[in-house]
Image (spheres, coloured by chain):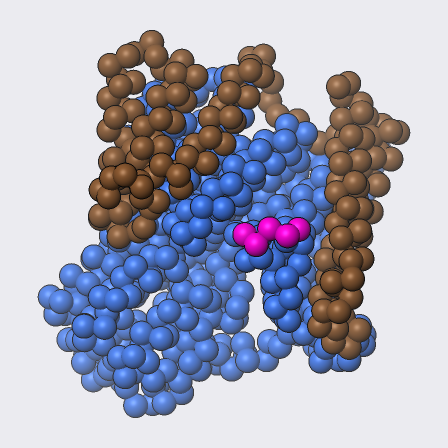
Chain colours: A blue, B brown
Amino acid sequence: MMEDFAAGLAMILSLSVIVAMAAGTAVGILVGVLPGLGTVVALTMVLPFTFAMEPLVSIALLLGVYCGSVYGGSVTAILINAPGTPQSAATMLDGHPLARRGHADLALGYATVASLFGGLFSIVVLVLLAPQLAAFALRFGPIEVFALTLFSLTCIASVSRESMIKGLLAGALGIALTTVGPDPMTGDIRFNFGLHQLSAGIGLIPTLVGLFALSEVLMRVADRRPSPPGDPKVGFRIAPWVKWRGLLVTLLRGSTIGSFIGALPGTGAGTAAFVSYSEARRTSRRRENFGNGEPEGVVAAESANNAVTGGALIPTLALGIPGDPATAVMLSTLIVQGVVPGPNLFAEQMPLLYAIFLSLVVVNVMMFAMGALGSQLFTRALRAPEPVILVGIVVLSMVGSYAVRNNAFDLAITVGAGLLGYALRRNGFPLPPLAIGMVLGPLIETSLRQSLLISRGDILVLGRHPIALVLFSLVAIFLLWPVLRGRVTRGKQARSCR
Amino acid sequence: MPGRFRDVAVGCAFLGGAALLWFETTREHYAATGARAGFNTIFFPRLVLATIACLALVLIVRGILSGPRGALPPAGAPASAWRLLGIVLAMVLYVAAIPALGFTIAGWLFVPVMLGMLGFFARPLACVAVSLAFPPAVWVFVRDLLNIQLPISPWFNIL
């Protein structure tokens, strides 16, 4: 084992691999920072270059882009309330309020450290548990995935804050929006109303960018909302150890959730971030601060979405099954390079495998360093006059929305989503449930319909699978938890009064 | 609109929207689409629409009985409806202009208009500098550095 490890270490200690990791991380962060341009766009941008590279150099480049872009999305989410990538939608919930209070430097510090921790934790899981987790992930059929997505939907309850009905309505609206376009099972076109542009569906990225970024611009214009007092703190600041000590459990829990959900094919970092955020809020002593700039919310979301990077590589490397679209791109590159993922990779090419694991560690450290340095630059943008910031948000939002599919109709969707977001916010509707609905909608529909097809319409089949049964029980417990907690609190108060 | 009826109006809008989309699912086009074990292409959308309708009804009834709930946005200075309308109109025209004129030329038209509406004309030099420099800077960064395609002007190949 040590020989393989040493051979792997020697492989990554070449100039070309190190340059590839640094370049990939830098490109990933830059693309992730632009609102809307996600990991897949970043990976496909560098993909043509990999064909002329050696296997490990190309893998190192892609790993850098992958991890960098997931982290980069959080920068925009924190600074301008627009998710740079869908994975960072949960980071906005507390990251942006913290930045609005003048602590952008601290918010980025929390996000960067949590990202590093989540990324490194997932590598440990990848090294120690890849074959076992991959085998367990194979037990997740459509019924289990449906149960997991239903479980993820309980996040809506935790991000709805004051009005549960409005949160649920926003979540259902998000799911409804995902039903526009091709049926994921049959390909039949739904709700296009004769507009061929709608036949491809309503894009997730243009909608999220419009919902959050443009509605934020409109809210600021309409309300002439005052900027926070004093200059926003620029740069990068890591909170003192005392603060981190209270966040260790959240870090570990978020990283575990991210690594596990990442290992399940087809789920993704967005789901992991919301589940982790929801869990942190449910168990936190400061749960009433969530949504108002609570660092624990940032740490929960960021540790989970970056832990997905290692988690998603588990089925990719151990079984040859991509965990998400980003790892699908990486899988194709591996195959083109002559590296065939699967159980044999673990038996026959251990030095290469160790080199990949070590590259991932180095990439995460580079991501931390570049994030810390880049934050000095990114946060300086906040010192620009408010009108310039607002114009910048609109222009960059349009760039991001257009670039995903090179489709001018997506620009109209972005503006429409901006107006919808503004109307919803004006009427007290929380936007995060809508984002959760849009992220989970296609997964819920596909898994539910696959389950019903397999069981020939027998809905009771959902309760016959042990894993699904556990997840359904957790859904029931989490939904009843606020009621139970209320009763316990009232009981305690009554006893103390006596 | 009095706050009491705000939720009722929003609930009605959701209910109306759900009803409209449900009506759409009754079109003959959908009846012929891939039914498998009784679950055709409109099974899931109808499930979601029924959920929306139920939740909207709860919102309406609750609004009638007890007035609005939920976190309304924090109160700022009085909203400037005309300014907001102007910004929305500028955004719509910008979106229409991007494919027609190209990203940079549309930006040159949109950026000064929006900066003006946001009161940045008080600093004319800065306004001109931002208006002139920002769209091409984004163009160069996104198109030349990141190699991401943006709509090109029909007249000038470089913008």
Is residue A283 toward the left or the right of residue A475 in the image? left
User: Is A195 part of what is drawn in magenta?
Assistant: yes
Q: Quadrant of residue B78?
A: top right
User: Is A487 part of what is drawn in magenta?
Assistant: no
* Rendered position, B33 above or below B84: below
The quadrant of the image that shows the N terminus of chain B is: top right
In front of the other: B75 or B56: B56
The quadrant of the image that shows the C terminus of chain B is: top left
In front of the other: B88 or A84: B88
Q: Which residues are magenta?
A: A193-197
Give the x, y percent position of residue A406: 40, 52
Q: Main secondary structure of the magenta part?
A: loop
Is residue A99 toward the left or the right of residue A363 in the image? right
Is residue A325 toward the left or the right of residue B22 in the image? left
Identity of the residue drawn at 81% across and 31% down: B8
Q: Quadrant of residue A341?
A: bottom left
Q: Quadrant of residue B17?
A: top right
In front of the other: B89 or A226: B89
